[in-house]
Amino acid sequence: VAYNIGLIGAGRMGALHAANAASNSRLDLCWIADTDRASAESLCERHNAAACGADDLLANPDVAGLIIASSSDSLLDLTIRARRAGKAVFVEKPLSLSVEALEAATSALSGQGPPVFVAFNRRFDPAFCALKARLDAGELGRLETLHLISHDPQAPSLAFIPRSGGLFRDFTVHDFDTARWLLGEAIVEVFAWASCLVDPAIAELGDVDTAKLVMRTSSGRLCMISNSRRSGYGYDQRIEAYGSKGALRVDNPEDGGVVRWGPEGRRGDPFFQSFHSRYAEAYRRETDHFADLIAGKADPRMTIEAAVAAVRLAEAAGESLRKGQPVGLALEEQQHA
Amino acid sequence: VAYNIGLIGAGRMGALHAANAASNSRLDLCWIADTDRASAESLCERHNAAACGADDLLANPDVAGLIIASSSDSLLDLTIRARRAGKAVFVEKPLSLSVEALEAATSALSGQGPPVFVAFNRRFDPAFCALKARLDAGELGRLETLHLISHDPQAPSLAFIPRSGGLFRDFTVHDFDTARWLLGEAIVEVFAWASCLVDPAIAELGDVDTAKLVMRTSSGRLCMISNSRRSGYGYDQRIEAYGSKGALRVDNPEDGGVVRWGPEGRRGDPFFQSFHSRYAEAYRRETDHFADLIAGKADPRMTIEAAVAAVRLAEAAGESLRKGQPVGLALEEQQHA
Amino acid sequence: VAYNIGLIGAGRMGALHAANAASNSRLDLCWIADTDRASAESLCERHNAAACGADDLLANPDVAGLIIASSSDSLLDLTIRARRAGKAVFVEKPLSLSVEALEAATSALSGQGPPVFVAFNRRFDPAFCALKARLDAGELGRLETLHLISHDPQAPSLAFIPRSGGLFRDFTVHDFDTARWLLGEAIVEVFAWASCLVDPAIAELGDVDTAKLVMRTSSGRLCMISNSRRSGYGYDQRIEAYGSKGALRVDNPEDGGVVRWGPEGRRGDPFFQSFHSRYAEAYRRETDHFADLIAGKADPRMTIEAAVAAVRLAEAAGESLRKGQPVGLALEEQQHA
Amino acid sequence: VAYNIGLIGAGRMGALHAANAASNSRLDLCWIADTDRASAESLCERHNAAACGADDLLANPDVAGLIIASSSDSLLDLTIRARRAGKAVFVEKPLSLSVEALEAATSALSGQGPPVFVAFNRRFDPAFCALKARLDAGELGRLETLHLISHDPQAPSLAFIPRSGGLFRDFTVHDFDTARWLLGEAIVEVFAWASCLVDPAIAELGDVDTAKLVMRTSSGRLCMISNSRRSGYGYDQRIEAYGSKGALRVDNPEDGGVVRWGPEGRRGDPFFQSFHSRYAEAYRRETDHFADLIAGKADPRMTIEAAVAAVRLAEAAGESLRKGQPVGLALEEQQHA
């Protein structure tokens, strides 16, 4: 017995989630909506689903849950409406780029009602989860400092930059969430320096492509973040956690498992070249988590409050970059999750 | 639209294949048979299937394919009967421990008729497949020598030893098949030395637990195999291929992805502790391959002839061990696959 | 034919340099001076040298060169006097903790006269030198950002903290020099956050033990530094260089070369536990470089100007920490070397 | 105070030992002899030594020790004469290719008299020594099986092949010695298969270039050896030791310490390309050991008996290859060291 679910958004992320939902034996992907009807129909054909409108989905009592992976600016509104319609919601990050909009929506998305789960993929990566579990088990004693390295294989298309919300809201937002998740403590100050070193066209669009950030928690713990829109060598996403009893690290997995020894030395397989492949298992686990949520077997692993806090840090980082100074965050604004 | 399939054998391997079939969206696991009815029913409950007898399955026209994972001594007979009944067959290795029985069955299992696929899991491991593809693409130039290391985490229960067929037929048979697959050439001579170093009780049962073998192909290429029933540190299964242009290696994957730096040094996660976890992806791909076979989209990746050749090598290795001398294999007996 | 040299300072660093000089066939360590005569005599006995006073050494025309490894506050004065006396000088870092004193001494230590070489050990580490050479050869295209991780195995004795000059002048000064060396460009701004996370007694002495710094060059390149007085797992000193064509890294060498596979996983040997062992080869090369300097075969690889620049960065980092803001550095003050 | 020593043989190995002796502060390399006077003089010039004849060296009472690195067929005779002349001897392996000659010389080289040390470099490699110490300390429980992989970067000149003594005496002899050293038990049977896969010209000269061997000890422990004259990727020399409590491994060190991350994946530095660089530290330690021997501070780490046993195994391997069968070794012939 599988739950009937619908998908809104048949783009790149929608297609990824559709494939995972289709191969999950606890979910039955029945309907797909997209403002571009042809996209919806093409994806429906692949997964034996029916194309329909978003409003139909919201109104359909047979829909137990909705995966929302539409355009960034529509995510929040659709999420609110879906929850009002009594649907469990799996919504793509970042839910919204605006702290104000998110704050205004908090009451609508919290409290009694169907579960809403904001999909930050790092929280479902098996290695990151294992790291979190070992930190929580006290293997490092007291966690003191944290290094997050997130370098993408290559910059997105220039067309995406203006609507991305900028590097911090689009990209670093993952690291802000990961930092809060792993540190388990409120971050009280952020300092950000950034440059445009990869592609001058990004600077012309008013954005940066390379950043180094430092953050401080209320108890004086420190977190460094390194970001780049282009590594040139694949998906480089690592975590280094340092504590009183040593260090725990998640390094880059290699994409294959064959090592070559040749005249040029020892050569591992390339790192993953896309988030699709790097986080394939994380996306499968997100889908499973959604099935658990619909079944009432779990609470959302990523709350609205956590999503708001991550965007708030992105906002503070932007302010720090503009002012050239660290920017503080009000403690009372941070509810930890 | 999924194919209705049945499973014969609800033991350890049957349960593993049942789980993969149940989560494969192209297969519908409808029936499970086992001589122990309670086992069948318990597994049916988990996967929403119906318990029945093996004969019912063979007679049922709705069954498109059968996974046969019953006791070793029943595999061959059930496979022959299933094929006669027009079913596609996915049968666990080793099909049979007897070269004579296998030879006698070859005509019944080859030629026109439903596909029969003998499931040697190594041939479906992603890293081994990547290695094979790179060898075939000529990355090493001419492949000259091959090292296969297969050490199990720990010895099986003593009760299993007498019915295992002995180390070579039960355990090394995988390496014999892997060697033939990767070398792509007939093996003409085998030399085997073995000892009982792990547990003297195994020697009392007339078997060995540690072996080193050398094999020679018709063109003089050499293959070394190292086997141990107990590594003490997890599943140790590696391949080293040496050629005129360097070496390609598949090393042991680690089970987690977190590295610890502590006073005792750099420590990776343990290796996998069972074939279930070490070959989880291989078993999923076997299931997928079976769906392809039923659909007529592929030929069996592992033929009857290859299964016979692997058991023949096991037999020769046993003879070598008894005589203390290398043992030759007739070239005409080896059809390569 | 070896050069007669003297050593001033028979403490920990003096003993290390004495051993290297004694086993260098191009140098003849003849005299050792220390304010503690007994220390000098004990070291003399080991290396077959004669104990004497520092003034004797400066006056002795047979002394071709002097290794100065006395207390930090005496290094600069002795170096000036040694140069005036016509001796080639190998002086331990940091030469002086005071930017003012260093600036006042620049004219006395530059220009025509015997070579003066300030021994920053990182510049002689084989792996760091290989990295520098590959960066200079353009292997990364344009170097964009740099990460320097320097974590000591354990904190120094509390008695040392007050006379250390503080974390930035005593410890980070190495990273400041390494950053300038590898970036090959003036650093224009520094931001530093630091905490006392290792030992509260260090905070009581007015110092910090954990720091994260970000630096910016005139062209917008970024450098992150991570410092800790205690790793708990040995000498952790790594460099990560990111450029337009990929990344180059120097990771921690392991101290032995034996890997253990056990139930707990794959375990490398511990990292080095002291700078003596971690930089053993670097210290040998410093000694060799000094022989080259005396022989007139090389120019000092580390100039006075570079030493001043490193201390100036330490001063700016201290100011940043006090003010909670980034601190700029005047470009004209930086002469690059 | 250094010992005056002489060197016989100014070829490749002689030059290597000369450099180490010259930079060892406990040895004074005063004289060098070679049948080719010009070679001796050229090497003398570099190390400030005096050229002379081998007979002069043997007769000279000021010579405390002799390093003998002349042509293979002269090593044994010179060693006997040097010992009779009262000199401590450091002689290159293999001392002699003939078991008969070695047996005949045993009495002359054993018992009371100056120390004779046969330089098998593996026994001085720091990593192999660390492995041996950990095995002796019981870290693996009982050592059960051993894998020795020795692949040279490239084949020697064809001119060398005929006078090499063949693959087993020239090359595998190192592994035979290493196996005996690490197993600490008599080897009772050897099986060898070998092919000419690298260069057909080697087969025309009656030799092989690729070999796989298995050996058995009296208690049933097993050792595998893999040899190749050409790896194509540098010096590949590894040891894998398997015991009841896990495994210990020495893998190939990389030559540099810089790792590159590029589009092609993670790439370590090449392995060492020659035994000079791979065993640089081992050769330095051999030289130090020789100084200890002259000083009477140590017993030869490698005895005549061990050298004879290694050549005897090479002989047995040759016989096994010719006969196509395992060959036994008489236990009484093996004195362990």
Image (cartoon, coloured by chain):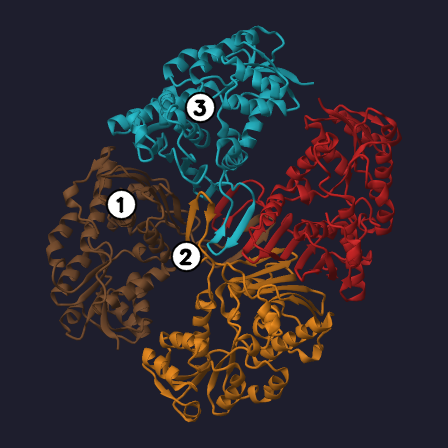
Chain colours: A orange, B brown, C red, D cyan
Circle 3 SS class: loop
Disc count in the image? 3
Residue A63 x, y percent position in the rendering? 40, 88
Q: Which mark is residue D336?
A: 3
The chain ID associated with circle 1 is B
Residue depicted at x 51% and y 30%: D276
Label 3 packing within 10 angstroms: few (<14), some (14-19), many (20+): few
Cα gap from disc 3 to disc 2, whole angstroms: 46 Å
Residue C281 placement: quadrant: top right
Nearer the observer: mark 3 or 2; the answer is 2
Picture quadrant where residue A214 is located: bottom right
Q: Nearer the viewer, mark 1 or mark 2?
A: 2
Q: Which mark is residue A256?
A: 2
Please give left or right for residue C337 compared with residue D291 in the image.
right
Q: Amino acid at mark 2?
A: Gly
Percent position (x, y) of residue D334?
40, 22
User: Disc 3 residue type?
Assistant: His
| Residue in view at x 53 percent, y 65 percent | A152
The answer to whether residue B225 is seen in the rendering is: no
Label 1, label 2: how far apart the Cα atoms are: 30 Å
Name the one closer to the observer, A189 or D304.
Answer: A189
Q: Which mark is residue D224?
A: none
Neighbours of disc 2 within 10 Å: few (<14), some (14-19), many (20+): some
